[in-house]
Image (spheres, rainbow, N blue to C red):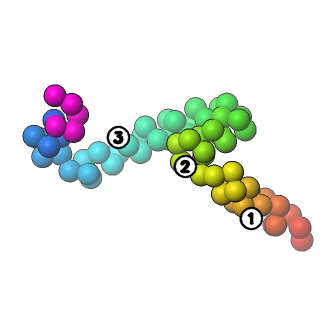
Amino acid sequence: MDALEWCEQNNIEPDDLDEIVHEAASSMASNSNNEGVPGQLEFLKIIAGWSDEDIIDTLFQLIVEPNRS
């Protein structure tokens, strides 16, 4: 039996998994942060599904633009 079948048989709801998913994602993000820029970019691209353009646009808005004044 796989985890989905078990959850269905035991009436597990999405809310029941929220904290587990949050903790797993937090752990993955922490590990990526510890790997520096390459690990962080890998996390954003592979895990979060961001494109290079998404990353660059966000960095530009958060870091470059505010420092232009």
Q: Which residue is mark 3?
A: 20
Q: Residues within 10 Å of mark 1 (few under 14, many from 20)?
A: few
Would residue 33 be counted in the magenta stretch? no
Q: Nearer the viewer, residue 9 or 69?
A: 9
**Helix, strand or loop under label 3:** helix
Three-letter amino acid code of the residue under disc 1: Gln
What is the span of residues highlighted in magenta in the rendered image?
A: 1-5
Sort mark 2 into few (<14), some (14-19) or many (20+) by Cα contacts within 10 Å.
few
The spot of residue 56 in percent (x, y) is: 73, 55
Of the numbered discs 3 and 1, the one sitting upstream in the chain is 3
Q: Amino acid at mark 2?
A: Gly
- The residue at which mark 1 appears reads as 61
Q: Is residue 54 left or right of residue 21?
A: right
Where residue 34 appears, as percent x and y from the top left, is: 65, 32
Query: Residue 49: which numbered mark, if any?
Result: 2
Q: Nearer the viewer, mark 2 or mark 1?
A: 2
Q: In the image, 58: left or right of 43? A: right
Horizontally, residue 41 falls left or right of residue 23, namely: right
Asked if marks 3 and 2 touch (Cβ < 8 Å), the reply is no
Q: Quadrant of the C terminus?
A: bottom right
For marks 3 and 1, give the CA distance: 32 Å
Q: Residue furthest top?
A: 1
Query: How far apart are labels 3 and 2 at the CA level?
Result: 21 Å
| Image position of 51 with respect to 6: above or below | below
Q: Is residue 51 above or below residue 66?
A: above
Residue at the farthest right position: 69
Disc number lying in front (3 or 1) = 1
Q: Within the image, what quadrant is residue 33 found in? A: top right
Furthest-bottom residue in view? Answer: 69
